[in-house]
Amino acid sequence: MADYQTIQSTGIRTAEIDEGLRAHMNKVYGTMSIGMVITALAAWAINGLATTADPSAAAGMIREGQYLTDFGAALYTSPLRWVVMFLPLIMVFAFGAMVNRLSAAGAQTFFYAFAALMGLSISWIFVVFTSFSIVQVFLITAIAFAGLSLWGYTTKKDISGWGSFLIMGVIGLIVAMVVNIFLQSPAVMFAISILGVLIFAGLTAYDTQNIKNTYLAHAMHGDQEWLGKAAIMGALNLYLDFINMFMFLLQLFGQRE
């Protein structure tokens, strides 16, 4: 009788953990999706302020019928562009340092603010690439991301060992991209883009499995505040995987204006 009660109790507890894991992953994907919407709206709105069809209000021409406003010229052609480019990276490091001191609500607010800033940072894509190719590459990225994340969630293979190699790859990418700012080499940018797609594809699967394993390791403790912040951090990691994979694919396949 005692053994039956133990088995029954274990089964109930396992069911609770499984249900909690589903809710946790739904929160991760939901928070990430809201961040993506904020980024898209911010990028679209900033592009609307940065460009105009009125030549009398223009600070410079992009192409026939489209011009940069004074705001656009400052954002895309002045030294301010370097601040806009690197500020999201600084915010990621700041978030990692502050997350333990933030509440779950505070971490979520920080993430949404970061998503808006990322929209500002990548708004230049509407100036360089056609709207059709942006949408096309976004859909390709979404399909690839969904498949990779699903595999990372369901696979029985332990891919935790990928982490250190992938992070080293990200550091190498950042260094190479900074160097190529001065080299301006299309061949180097092409190589960076291919490696970037592969690295962030791997990180999508790795981060998904890590989010799942982190929840399972801490679910017994029932610390909802910590789990809430863990969901935000997981959403941030997957958001960055998606955005970076999208940007590298856009460099490879996007049709330029």
Image (spheres, rainbow, N blue to C red):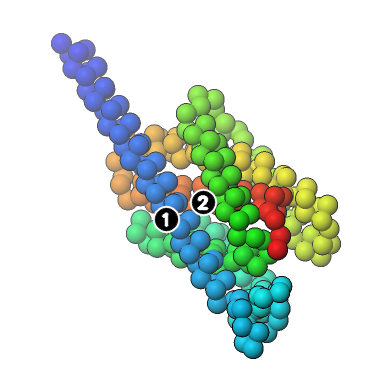
Check disc 1 and report its element: helix, strand or loop: helix
Instruction: State the residue in front, 151 or 255.
Output: 255
Q: Nearer the viewer, mark 2 or mark 1?
A: 1
So how many labels did they put on this image? 2
- The amino acid sitting under disc 1 is Ile
Q: Do the residues labelled 2 and 1 touch (CB within 8 Å)?
A: no
- Going by the image, does 207 lie left or right of 245? left
Instruction: State the residue in front, 69 or 78.
Output: 69
- Going by the image, does 210 lie left or right of 188? left
Residue of label 2: 239
Residue 34's label in the rendered image is 1
Check disc 2 and report its element: helix, strand or loop: helix
Q: Is residue 17 above or below residue 246?
A: above
Q: Is residue 43 visible?
A: yes
x and y percent of residue 211 in the render?
A: 46, 40
Please identify the quarter of the rendering in which residue 103 is found.
Answer: bottom left
Q: Is residue 98 visible?
A: no
Residue located at (60% from left, 33% from top): 161
- The amino acid sitting under disc 2 is Tyr
x and y percent of residue 209 in the render?
A: 49, 35
Residue 10's label in the rendered image is none
Quarter of the picture holding the C terminus? bottom right
- Going by the image, does 156 lie left or right of 82? left
Residue located at (63% from left, 72% from top): 83
Residue located at (82% from left, 56% from top): 186
Q: How far apart are marks 2 and 1 (CA)?
A: 10 Å
Q: Residues within 10 Å of mark 1 (few under 14, many from 20)?
A: some
Residue located at (45% from left, 51% from top): 32
x and y percent of residue 111 in the render?
A: 45, 59
Q: Residues within 10 Å of mark 2 (few under 14, many from 20)?
A: many
